[in-house]
Image: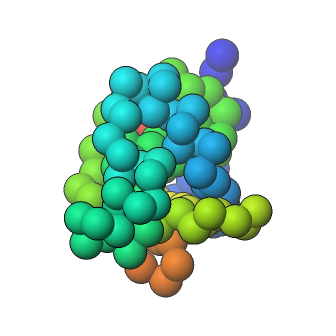
Amino acid sequence: MTAKVKYDEVEVGQEIPAAGYRVRRLDLVKYAGASGDFNPIHWNERYAKSVGLPDVIAHGMYTMAQGGRFLTDWAGDPAAVVEYGVRFSSMVVVPDDEEGATITVSGRIEEKLPDNRVVVALTATSNGSRVLSKARAVVRLA
């Protein structure tokens, strides 16, 4: 695949429109199976509350993956993301209902680099709180 976004068509400061990613308890159970992280704070409400959490919380790496999904959806090619890093700043609390929680991710072109690469700064929030901080990626565009 080749990235669908063209390097010459983006500018520093350009905003990448936000996308929302719903997360429900079932998603967390599936992620636990795929990742091998079966910590009960990610699926057992009783246990999560017993250790002082407000409810079940999403895995940090699941949250980070939604930022990666945002980048690959935007670029149009999963291989376009050549570097990606974040710090976790808050929890994604996932209630046990049909709605679950939503992780909203947006981006901004922070820098243009040689070799058709751009630095993208991401903002990820859930329920009014920033859940990722210092979220940055280098993406190679067409």
Q: Residue at x 28, y 51 (%)?
A: 86
Residue 106, visible in the rendered structure: no
Image quadrant in which you'd find residue 29: top right
Q: Which residue shows up at 66% across the image and 16% down it? A: 1
Residue lying farthest to the right in this orientation: 98
Q: State whether residue 58 is above or below residue 141.
A: below
Residue 95 appears at what percent x and percent y? 57, 67
Of 57 and 135, which appears nearest the observer? 57
Relative horizontal placement of residue 12, taking residue 15 as reference (left or right): left
Identity of the residue furthest to the bottom in this view: 128
**Relative image position of residue 131 (x, y in whole percent):** 38, 66
Residue 47 in view of the camera: yes
In the foreground, 111 or 22: 22
> Quadrant location of the C terminus?
top right
Residue 78: x and y, percent? Answer: 56, 26
Q: Nearer the viewer, residue 2 or 87?
A: 87
Q: Is residue 133 left or right of residue 32?
A: left
**Who's the residue at 47% across and 48% down the image?**
43
Q: Is residue 123 above or below residue 80?
A: below
Which quadrant of the view contains residue 137? top left
